Structure formats: C-alpha cells, structure tokens
Image: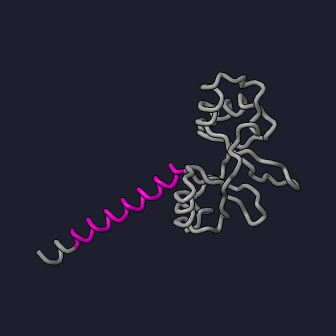
Amino acid sequence: MTVGEICNREVIVIQRDETILEAAKLMRQFHVGAVIVVDKQNNRQVPVGIVTDRDLVVEILATELDETVITVGDIMAPEIFSVQENTATHEAIDFMRRKTIRRLPIVDETGELVGILTLDDALQLLSEQLLDLAKLVRYEQKKEARHRP
C-alpha cells in the first residue's frame, strides 16, 4: 500500500506572507494542528514549510509577540520533509520516525502538494490492521474448535 492511498487529500495551506493569526484561525476553523506553507510555482502548490499549533504557543504566545504582524514565513519550520505519493506506507512511517515528525506532506512527481500523512492517520491505520489480525486469530480458533471438537 502506498502513502498516496491513505493520506488525507484535504490539506489546509497558507502562503508565507500571511499572519500567524490567520494560520491560527485556519487551524481552528478546520480543526487541524498544522497548516502547510506553500509557494505557488507554475500554478502548483509546492510545500516550503509547516506551522503547528505548538509553534504558535511556544514561539508567539509564550513570548508575547504580536500575532497580527508576524507572518507564517517568520516562524515556519526552516526545513520541510515530504515524500512522494508512490512511497510505501511503511517507508513513510519509518521516515517520520527517523526525522521525528508528526506530519508529513505528500507530493506528486512534480513536487506539488497532494496530501498529508499525520501520526494520527498512521496510528489509526496500524490499529485497524492489528484489529484485523486479532480477528483472524479469533476466527482460526473458532474454526479449529468446530472442526476438531
């Protein structure tokens, strides 16, 4: 299974010159913990950064900076990691672990943003797979009990 098959295709994006107040409003409106900062390049949205709810708290609120003048470009993570949508899911999860990131933008072969994989998404997928395995064990036990009383 590829990450493109399971990623969330509805990504909340923002331009780097928008204020962090606007980023916070988007997070609240769409109930997300991060926005992806994009640049428009040849009519494509290319991820260039990420701003998280934690960034807002630690960088802005805790330091009492003016959220109406600071832009997302001022506080976005300086390096953004992404993977292509044809990357195997287990490879993407391993990449997230190695880079210690909770959110992973997914891009197509041209580098355009097409989705996002979050830690929550990965946990849900893995828990569903574990549940399927547990059901298989239970089914096999019942099957054996029926055929070998």
Please determine whether, in this image, residue 34 is positioned above or below residue 123.
Answer: above
Q: Residue at x 77, y 33 (%)?
A: 71
Q: Residue furthest right?
A: 42
Total numbered circles: 0
Residue reaching furthest to the left: 149
Residue toward you, 113 or 140: 113
In the rendered image, residue 108 lying in the magenta stretch gets the answer no
Please indicate whether residue 118 sits to the left or right of residue 78 in the image.
left
The quadrant in which residue 42 appears is bottom right
Q: Is the stretch drawn in magenta largely helix, strand or loop?
A: helix
- Range of the magenta residues? 119-143
The x, y position of residue 140, in whole percent, is 26, 71
Q: x, y (%) of residue 120?
A: 50, 49
Specify the quadrant of the image occupied by residue 68: top right
Q: Position of residue 13 (x, y in %)?
A: 72, 43
What residue is drawn where x is 17% and y is 77%?
Answer: 147
Q: Is residue 124 above or below residue 60?
A: below
* Residue 80 place in picture, x, y as percent: 68, 52
Q: Quadrant of the C terminus?
A: bottom left
Name the quadrant containing residue 35: top right
Quadrant housing the N terminus: bottom right
Q: Nearer the viewer, residue 76 or 144?
A: 76
Q: Is residue 131 magenta?
A: yes
111 vs 54, nearest the viewer = 54
Residue lying at 22% horizontally and 69% vertically, measured from the top left: 141
Q: Which colouring convention does the figure follow?
A: one colour
**Residue at the image position 70 percent from the left and 34 percent from the top:** 23
